[in-house]
Amino acid sequence: METVVNGANTGWVLICAALVMLMTPGLAFFYGGMSRSKSVLNMLMMSFTALGIVSVLWVLYGYAIAFGSSRGGLFGWSSGLVGLDDLVRNVTVDSAENGVVNTFGLPDLAFSGFQVMFAIITVALISGAVADRMKFGAWVAFTAIWSTVVYFPVAHWVFAFGVAEEGGQGAGASGGLFAADSGGWIVNRLGALDFAGGTAVHINAGAAALALVLVLGKRKGFAKEPMRPHNLPFVMLGAGLLWFGWFGFNAGSALAANGLASLAFVNTQVATAAALLAWIGTERLRDGHATTLGAASGAVAGLVAITPAAGAVNPLGAIAIGLVAGAACCLAVTLKHRLGYDDALDVVGVHLVGGLVGTLMIGVVADGEFAAGYESVLGGGSFALLGKQALAAVAVMAYSFIVTYVIALAIKATIGLRISEEEEITGIDQTTHAESAYELGASMGGGGGGLASATSAPLPTSTRVSS
Amino acid sequence: MRLVTAVIKPFKLDDVKRALEQIGVQGMTVSEVQGFGRQRGHTEVYRGAEYTVSFVPKVRVEVLVDEADAARVVDAVVAAASSGSIGDGKVWTVPVDEVVRVRTGERGAEAL
């Protein structure tokens, strides 16, 4: 155990934390471009309010629940972590003895600053499912309650390493890590591999999105009138920012500037690339067109799927995961039309399905030469890891779905989940936020030439369409 | 007096404007509209969901002209707006009873 702050590791993790922070605004644009022009501001707001609410809750008690002393592996609690108090005592002293420096020579405060960004984006991911129709107040309440009773405990299950128990992947005999004296049950007892949050972040958000839209109901006109993305360049921009930030998410999860971080970095790039190609290839075969939305969606599906696996597979395994994720998610996003649930921007199809693909495929393609416990079906000939991965995935999925369903019912019964039909048709931007994203048309003061040079001026995108 | 109305492809607007200026037309009103004729719409695919866009963007040009100039203006618009492919649009005229210039109060042909 290092006793002084390791500058390289600390610098790397702090930079990665900033990269992960940028993913949430990136996600806001990814979703915002896919939504309709009358509700793009609400879509951006849901991500930005997640940044606001979760950051504060994290400092108040979120870190204490996720990384406090483990209570049976189910959740943590250490009253000294309220307000991150224990972490800031003697923070200027480079010593392990004051409890602020962990195994990697990383101040726990840096780890906390890195992990809060995961908590923020996980709840923000859910917002894509509820586009156009969820009461803003209900979203605020949902963000606070869901983070508290779903994300913080599940993050403990998956991210809170501790003293290794039998079969677990704990930190070893040197003692506890990140203040959790014995860690979360998935990472420590079950020993499933989740490098950066395929279960805690993506399966969790995807299952929650499904439960929430089942209570919330469909958008007015779902499956009857077309709901086209209003700004595909925003979607591409958002996907690019997500891709960039994801290097922090995955490579940063090594918690050190080392070879493992490099492996995660390369795997992230190549799996994302493969998934992008698989998605546009699949839709080219199925629909006859390779689309920009497909390229952006494929990239995100690949990022999701490699998240749990980034430190457990070699680059060829990463390509395999990317190819399967790109094709599987491309097929899965059409399920909502067949099954009739309105997951507006495909949080289930991309994050739940992509998260499952990555989490399960670890059991198939993990490189058995990396470490004990990494023996997979193809890399070591063992089915044991696949079983652990499946159990972790199902546990997170079931807990998230059930608890989210109850939260949604409770909000529906108290303050209400949905805006009125009239507000929804008019547009939630105007009726809830008293703003419009765009000023369309010269007569509204938008001016600036407009029709005078119509050959180069864009026409409004409010083209009416019918299915 | 007559009102000449043309619904044309948006990218032909500059050509039509230039052609009308060349034959001495001094003003016009232009609006962005949507619709379809024999061209019908087109289909778009988003994440596997196929949408038929039945109304396509067009530009409507309106010009008030003297009775005697109407035929020449229509011919000029047709010549300038034509691309030879389906969806080029239509031009029609209707009689106009009265025109008043707001600034001066001039009426009829004086107001054109």
Image (cartoon, rainbow, N blue to C red):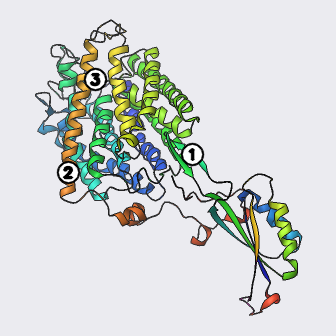
Tell me which residue sits at (57%, 58%) in the image.
A463
Q: Measuring from the top left, give residue A153's x and y in whole percent.
A: 19, 35
Q: Is residue A226 shown in magenta? A: no
Q: Measuring from the top left, give residue B72's x and y in whole percent.
A: 88, 72
Marks 3, 2: nearer the viewer: 2
Q: Quick one: A383 or A466, which is closer to the camera? A: A466
> Marks 3 and 2, Cα distance to the nearest angstrom?
49 Å
- Per the rendering, the mark at residue A4 is 3
Marks 2, 1: nearer the viewer: 1
Bounds of the magenta segment: B94-104
**Pointers 2 and 1 in contact (CB under 8 A)?**
no
Judging by the rendered image, the residue that carries numbered circle 2 is A409
- Label 1: chain letter: B
Q: Quadrant of residue A160?
A: top left
Q: Quadrant of residue B98?
A: bottom right
**Pointers 1 and 3 in contact (CB under 8 A)?**
no
Q: Quadrant of residue A63?
A: top left
The local secondary structure at tag 3 comes to loop
Tell me which residue sits at (71%, 61%) in the image.
A454
Q: Quadrant of the C terminus of chain B?
A: bottom right
> Marks 2 and 1, Cα distance to the nearest angstrom?
37 Å
Marks 1, 3: nearer the viewer: 1
Q: Measuring from the top left, give residue A241's x and y in whole percent.
A: 48, 39
The local secondary structure at tag 2 comes to helix
Q: Is residue B102 shown in magenta? A: yes
- Ranked by sequence position, the earlier of labels 3 and 2 is 3
How crowded pointer 3 is (Cα within 10 Å; few <14, some 14-19, many 20+) is rated as some
Query: Is residue A247 in view?
Result: no
**Pointers 3 and 2 in contact (CB under 8 A)?**
no
Left or right of residue A55: residue B55 = right
How crowded pointer 1 is (Cα within 10 Å; few <14, some 14-19, many 20+) is rated as few
- Label 2: chain letter: A
